[in-house]
Image (cartoon, helix red, strand yellow):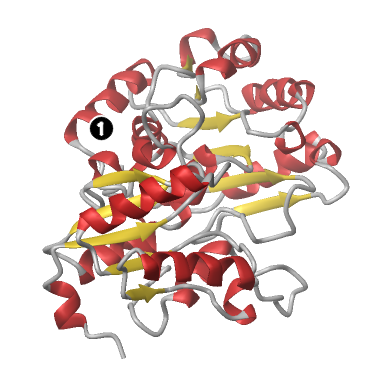
Amino acid sequence: MLDLQALAREKTVIIFRLGSIGDTVISLPCLHAIAKATPNARRLVLTNFPVNAKAAPLEAILGPSGLIHGTMKFPAATRSPRQMWLLFKELRRSGAKTLFFMTERRGVAATWRDVLFFKLCGLKQIIGAPVTRALNQSRHLDSGDIEPECERLARCFSDSLSIDLNSQSSWDLNLTTAEKSRAAAILDPFNSKPFLAINMGGKLARQQWPVTHWLELVAKLRARLPGYGLLIIGAPDDFNQAARVAERWHAQFCVNACGQLSPRESAAAVAHCRLFIGHDSGPMHLAAAVGARCVGLFGNNNPPRRWHPYGRDNVAIHRMSGIENIGVTEVEDVIFAQLAKPEWPVSTNG
């Protein structure tokens, strides 16, 4: 049985979490629970860093949130003896005795290998490690779909922490006043008019709906929503493609913010949209986290539901034959069904 009183007195704890923006966002409920259980601790995240990068993707989401206080580099790609030795010494120097194990499905053998390594590093208490097949694998639901990944993560901590996935506070990014002000400045051209938000990016080509489909969809939406604005978010590399799509909208009511906003600023802006439409990507999970109603487009990269936008009545259109086989009219119909639903107040997260 976990001693919560002793945990609350710890000075430093380690959180083991690898992945990118989407992986970080879906772990927010667990991170809030960890922060609540360790109010006096310095929370350091052991995570992966992109090659030649000074910061981890996780820092772009959690840096200013107060949920963590720093990161440590985990050599996920090479695991050379020298790098593991350096990590061993760094973990020893941290003085931490507790590690929260929160990674993707790695297999039971790999999980035990990591647990034993962390034990050697002086981390006597390992919480949440999926050392059984039941915890390491996603459940198959009665619907035939796969358990959402955020539910599997929460299940790993169910014996030690109280995690409420259905509470909006569990998904709070703790956005700063500066981030909200930057988002408000980007949205100023809309002059408080309703707007849609879209993201057309994605790490993998098979995750991306064809740009020709986006062009056709935007033209249809423009004709049916003449009083709406359009916000396009994404990375700097998405700017040129977004500019093509923006040409199909009312010029004065379209903002191409690709490369202009940090991920957290993008979340602050999207929190005010009437509807978010996007691929299986980090921005979609950010939109869901801030309470925006989402329409997610999915192909054959993952089975249904595992990475769908979580919460309320978000909709995912999932085509295992390939995302390119999702029809424009189908997406249009879902969008207008979502827009027909009553609005809810903007989340305090935004």
State the image coordinates of residue 12 (x, y, percent, origin top left): 19, 61
Residue at left offset 56%, top offset 31%: 198
State the image coordinates of residue 269 (x, y, percent, origin top left): 37, 32
Vertical side of 212 occupied by 61: above or below: below
Q: Quadrant of residue 205?
A: top right
Residue 287 in sight from this viewpoint: no
Vertical side of 184 occupied by 279: above or below: below
Residue at left offset 31%, top offset 69%: 123
State the image coordinates of residue 311 (x, y, percent, origin top left): 49, 60
Label total for image: 1
Q: Quadrant of the C terminus?
A: top left
Q: Nearer the viewer, residue 43 or 341?
A: 43
State the image coordinates of residue 181 (x, y, percent, origin top left): 22, 27
Residue 296 in sight from this viewpoint: yes
Q: Is residue 74 left or right of residue 105?
A: left
Q: Quadrant of the N terminus?
A: bottom left
Amino acid type, label 1: Lys
Residue linked to disc 1: 180
Q: Quadrant of residue 113?
A: bottom right
Residue at left offset 19%, top offset 75%: 7
Q: Is residue 57 left or right of residue 68?
A: right
